């Protein structure tokens, strides 16, 4: 059964479509490009999950789409990076934290939810590496966009890149620690319920998980 999209996702996608059309009428081609690219990317999380037979809880799907919208459209077209000094810092930290959680969930999935198949520190380290690798690939993407389309995603160049990677390291570390403590039966902030929600939505991938979370998400 096809998963329906949350209302927030529909609203964001509608706004992006309208912005792309308005940009075309005004011949603001950079706006058209960013709005269109952002719109396409908002469909990828759900599409990616479906290809691999996964289900994204509405909370995670909404968070992913909001992040894409905030990073590309609000950051570049609305110039939130220039208006708010903390915008880039917050997005990098939250994205690194999220990717560490995603890495943990996917690695944990390979063990079918068996808490004892590998040491918790090993799964946490792998989750950290996944997150930081994605952060590095994003910096490559920013460089490519700047060089190819004349954008200014890197801002101050090397300094901006290194600052982003340092922030990514902090977010990845927190996400990895959250995964470590989850395996120990403890929670870090609000990360635990999000992990539980994903596991509940994909129970068949975590068959060996003992003390499974209640199906309440």
Image (tube, rainbow, N blue to C red):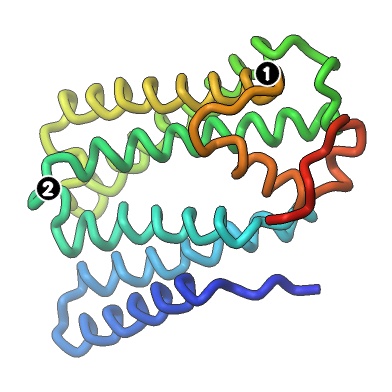
Say which residue appears at 27% left-offset and 79% top-offset. Answer: 19
**Where's the N terminus, which quadrant?**
bottom right
Q: Quadrant of residue 46?
A: bottom right
Labels in figure, total: 2
The dot on residue 154 is none
Q: Position of residue 62 (x, y in %)?
A: 50, 61
Label 2's element?
loop
Tag 2: Cα neighbours inside 10 Å, few (<14), some, or many (≥20)? few
> Among all residues in the image, which is located at the extreme bottom?
25
| Residue on which the image places disc 1 | 123
Left or right: 2 with respect to 65? right
Q: Whole-Å distance between the Cαs marked 2 and 1?
A: 35 Å
Q: Are the residues at dot 2 and dot 1 in contact (C-beta closer than 8 Å)?
A: no
- Residue 60 seen anywhere in this rendered image of the structure: yes
| Residue on which the image places disc 2 | 84
**Where's the C terminus, which quadrant?**
bottom right
Q: Position of residue 109 (x, y in %)?
A: 78, 34
| Viewer-nearest residue: 133 or 75 | 75
> Among all residues in the image, which is located at the extreme left?
83
- Residue 129 seen anywhere in this rendered image of the structure: no
């Amino acid at each position: 059964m096809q998963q329906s999209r949350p209302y927030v996702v529909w609203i964001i996608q509608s706004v992006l479509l309208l912005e792309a059309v308005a940009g075309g009428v005004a011949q603001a081609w950079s706006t058209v490009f960013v709005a269109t690219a952002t719109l396409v990317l908002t469909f990828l999380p759900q599409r990616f999950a479906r290809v691999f037979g996964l289900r994204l809880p509405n909370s995670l799907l909404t968070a992913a789409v909001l992040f894409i919208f905030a990073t590309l459209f609000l950051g570049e077209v609305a110039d939130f990076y220039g208006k708010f000094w903390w915008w880039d810092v917050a997005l990098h930290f939250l994205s690194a934290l999220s990717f560490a959680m995603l890495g943990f969930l996917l690695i944990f999935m390979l063990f079918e939810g068996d808490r004892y198949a590998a040491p918790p520190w090993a799964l946490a380290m792998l989750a950290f590496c996944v997150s930081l690798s994605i952060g590095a690939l994003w910096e490559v993407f920013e460089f490519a966009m700047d060089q190819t389309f004349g954008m200014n995603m890197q801002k101050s160049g090397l300094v901006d890149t290194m600052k982003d990677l340092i922030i990514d390291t902090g977010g990845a570390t927190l996400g990895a620690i959250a995964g470590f403590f989850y395996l120990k039966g403890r929670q870090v902030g609000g990360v635990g319920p999000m992990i539980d929600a994903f596991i509940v939505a994909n129970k068949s991938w975590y068959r060996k998980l003992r003390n499974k979370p209640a199906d309440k998400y």
